[in-house]
Structure formats: C-alpha cells, structure tokens
Amino acid sequence: MKVAIAGATGFVGSRLVEKLQAAGHQVVVLSRDAAKAGRVFPASAYPNLEVVAYTPAESGDWQKSIAGCDAVVNLAGVPIAEERWTEARQQAILDSRRLTTAKLVEAIVNANPKPSVLVSASAIGYYGTSETAEFDETSPAGNDFLAAVCKDWEAAAQPAKNAGTRLAILRLGIVLGMGGALAKMLPPFKLFAGGPLGTGKQWFSWVHREDVVDLILYALQNPQVEGVLNATAPNPVRMNELCQTLGEVLQRPSWLPVPGFALEMLLGDGAKLVLEGQKVLPKQTLASGFQYQYPTLKLALEEILSGS
C-alpha cells in the first residue's frame, strides 16, 4: 500500500510508520516541519518514505500528494494535556483537529484516483466523564469541551465517506508505551513516591501503543472495518488499580496520593483527563474481529517496562 499520514512524528504515528516501513509499504508523511520529519525518518532507514511539507489548516499543493495513495491516516492534533487550557489553547486544540481533518478530507474528495480508506483519530473524550456510567461505540456524546471537540473532529471526516472512501474513526483511550502519559507517571514511582491521582476511583480507559498501531493497520487492510471503533483495551481499570499495578510491576510502593488540586495547578482544565475519566469498552472493535496483544493492564505494563 501507499499510505499518507498526518501526525506521523507523534507517539502513535512514529510507531505506525516503523511498522508500515518494515512491512514494505510506501509512506507519505505530511508534516508542518519537513526538516524535523526528515530527522525522525532518515532516508537511510526509511527508503520507502516521502516527506511532504504542509500547512494543515490550508488548502495547497500538498493536497496533490493524496492522489494515488491507497489510504490516509489522520493522527494530527496538538497535545491536550501539555498546557493550561487558556482560550487560545482551547482554540488550538479544536482547530488542529477539525481544520486539519477538513483539509485532508478535501484532498481525498478531490483526488483522482481517490484513496480507498481514511482512518481518522478521535478520542474517548467524546463520551464525557463519569465514575458510574459505561460507554461503548453506540453511547451518545457528552456535553463538555472535549466532547464538543470530538464531535466536530468526527464530523469533519464524514465527507470522505460521502465521496465513497471507507471511513473508520478510532476513539483513542490513553495510550500507554515508553513515553506519553506513562512517562509522566514513572518518576515518582521510581523515587518511591508514587500513588493514585485524585480520588483513585475514576476510570482509566487505556490501550497499549502496539494495539493502537495494530488496530490502525487492521482498519487499513480489512474492508469490513468502518464506522466508529473504540481504541481502548477491553479491561479498563480505576486509577487505584492502575497505580497499584504499576507499583507491582516496578516493585515500588503505591501509597502516596497526588491531590487533585496539585494536578489542576499544573495542568489547569487538562487535569480533567486523569481526575475524572470514563469507563469505555471496545464492543465494536472486538465485534470486528480485532484481537488485542495486551488486553490486561499488567500484561501491558510488564511489556512496556521490561527494559526500564
């Protein structure tokens, strides 16, 4: 296949590019910073890769690179929990998803020949937060800021389907791997000061990075896969269990809670991601026939931390 990817240098995208390259596929990396992408994916190691500079929120010559691609993967979007949610940051969170998706879809609609499939990211923030409810792909959207972002993000992808391109939308949970969210949790545990964040009762719907990447590949390669799929492991846990399991795997105690106000001081509204949470089950993903390598948290953490 020839696959165009937006968001290729990110935590999930970089691993996806590695696996596509290893399987002999051609990759077109759409990047705002072509020089950075060239450093991340040097030609010596990635002979089947082409970097195309693009301005995500604008139409342009970059859109011509979509013609002739078999598939497009959209993972673009500024990080949600890296900075305080000022008004400007909220706008950037929304625009980097909605506008980028709209311009990618515009390129797909105008391409000749068209890609046969678009795999577009969304997030489990779509469902809102709850300590008691259980969500699957058929559950309605929540009514907070992240839910509104996800609704707009997903709506921007729909015209691709109307143009005849198969559309799979993956609502990503918190992706675990060496890096990302887990990297921020490890230091206190290694210093024997780890523990649950906030009340510890909130749900943590996680997924191993390898399973996310494999689900993207599965969606690219299997024509029956379309519509919304939750990219979460089938066994979500409460925060207490996450921290207890992390402590066990690291052979460190997990007793020192991090109060919610401390996280809010650090992350502002972004703290909601870990302080509130939601229990999300991948019913459609399992029904599609996808099989997880890491269905349980302990299995996932043991694999991730085996070299730490």
Image (spheres, rainbow, N blue to C red):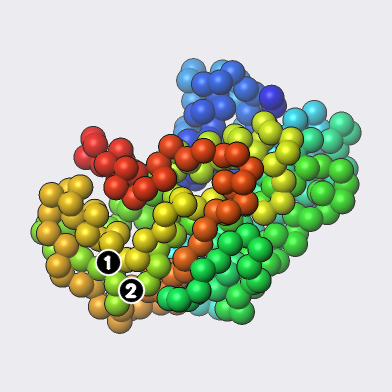
Residue sitting at 58 percent across and 62 percent down?
A: 136
Instruction: Name the secondary structure under disc 2.
Output: loop
Q: Which quarter of the image is occupied by the N terminus? A: top right
- Circles 1, 2 touching at the beta carbon (< 8 Å): yes
Q: In the figure, 223 relative to 259: above or below?
A: above
Q: Position of residue 155 (x, y in %)?
A: 75, 62
Mark 1 or 2 closer to N-term? 2
- Around disc 2, counting alpha carbons within 10 Å, would you say few (fewer than 14), some (14 to 19), or many (20 or more)? some
As drawn, the label of residue 124 is none
Amino acid found under the numbered disc labelled 1: Asn
The quadrant in which residue 29 appears is: top right
User: What residue did someone put label 2 on?
Assistant: 201
Q: Is residue 286 left or right of 255 when viewed as pictured?
A: right
Q: In the figure, 126 relative to 301: above or below?
A: below
Q: In the figure, 41 relative to 62: above or below?
A: above
Instruction: Name the secondary structure under disc 1.
Output: helix
User: What residue did someone put label 1 on?
Assistant: 240
Amino acid found under the numbered disc labelled 2: Lys
- As measured in the structure, the alpha-carbon distance from the residue carrying label 1 to the one carrying label 2 is 6 Å
Residue sitting at 37 percent across and 61 percent down?
A: 237
Observer-nearest of 295 and 67: 295
Observer-nearest of 94 and 246: 246
Observer-nearest of 222 and 305: 222
Q: Position of residue 51 (x, y in %)?
A: 62, 32
